[in-house]
Image: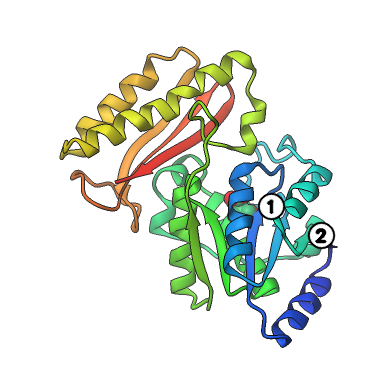
Amino acid sequence: MITATTVDEVRSFVKKQKSEGKTVGLVPTMGFLHEGHASLVKKSVEMCDVTVVSVFVNPTQFAPNEDFDAYPRDFKRDCALLESCGADLVFHPEASEMYAEDFTTGVTMDVLSKTLCGKTRPIHFNGVCTVVSKLFNIVTPDKAFFGQKDAQQLAIIKRMVRDLNFDIEIVGCPIVREEDGLAKSSRNTYLNADERKAALCLSQSVAIGKKMAEEGVSDTETILAAMRAHIEKEPLAKIDYVEAVDGVTMQPTEKVKDGVLFAMAVYIGKTRLIDNFIV
Ligand code: PAF
């Protein structure tokens, strides 16, 4: 596996692959990789001739009060995992390679970014759209792979690709969970032993909601009330939101139907975790 730190290195690698008629897959990540990321890389290896993975903790998607500095990093371990999954190139730039000092252009996302996580993190999705556009322009992949755990991010990227005519297929991949149900996340590493136990209230609440939807409960509010009630029983948990939205527009919806996204963000101690299911 090649390690590239500059845009030029990535461009010449991709150019060569494309001149040989190969298809390119991109998996954008912020590193501290786990089996969720591994599943995206494996999917790309399966579907594309060549797989590029970016490992870059993107400063523009963190507000000043958020965990940019504390965000876990372990590039050596990431590389070992990526090699074992069959990635061909890892792009690991410095922030200065991605953002010139006088960088002043960005991609903004309206409407879809105003609900769910966007309410608590108002600048987050503009930062995500900007860095992902830059990665798309640098790597020019045929396909790009994103996890369903960040369901709002996935919907937003799909919309951005449509709105800005990127010639890239976005492939969404299922949530990967720990054996006890907790969705895999780089932020799980912040949890102490009691918080780790308490964090199960998210996946348990997802299971409650999913069962009710499968059993035919037809209004989202009844399901949301049961999901919230379960989380509220956990003393270490504080709900940021538990909501139901249309899976494409990210706007609130009252009726349970195919494509409705039930999503939550919950603080366990100081750690903000997310989880979701789609009907
Ligand atoms: O999902 C993430 O890890 C990040 O938001 C992404 C897509 C790599 C952009 O920085």
Asked if 144 appears above or below 8 in the picture, the reply is: above
Tell me if mark 1 has few (under 14), some (14-19) or many (20+) residues whose alpha carbon lies within 10 angstroms of its own. Answer: some
Percent position of residue 38, x then y:
64, 49
Q: Is residue 99 left or right of residue 128?
A: right
Q: Return the mark for residue 58.
A: 1
| Residue kind at label 2, given as amino acid type | Ser
Residue that appears at 33% across and 25% down? 228
Measure how far apart labels 1 and 2 are at the Cα level: 11 Å
Report if the beta carbon of the residue with label 1 is closer than 8 angstroms to ligand 1: yes
Can residue 53 be seen by looking at this rendering? yes
Q: Is residue 79 above or below residue 45?
A: above
> Position of 245 compared to 24: left or right?
left
Frontmost residue, 133 versus 26: 26
Can you tell which quarter of the image residue 112 is in? bottom left
* Residue bearing mark 2: 96
Residue 105 seen from this side: no
User: Where in the figure is residue 254, as x and y percent of width and height?
Assistant: 20, 43
Give the position of the N terminus as an image quadrant.
Answer: bottom right
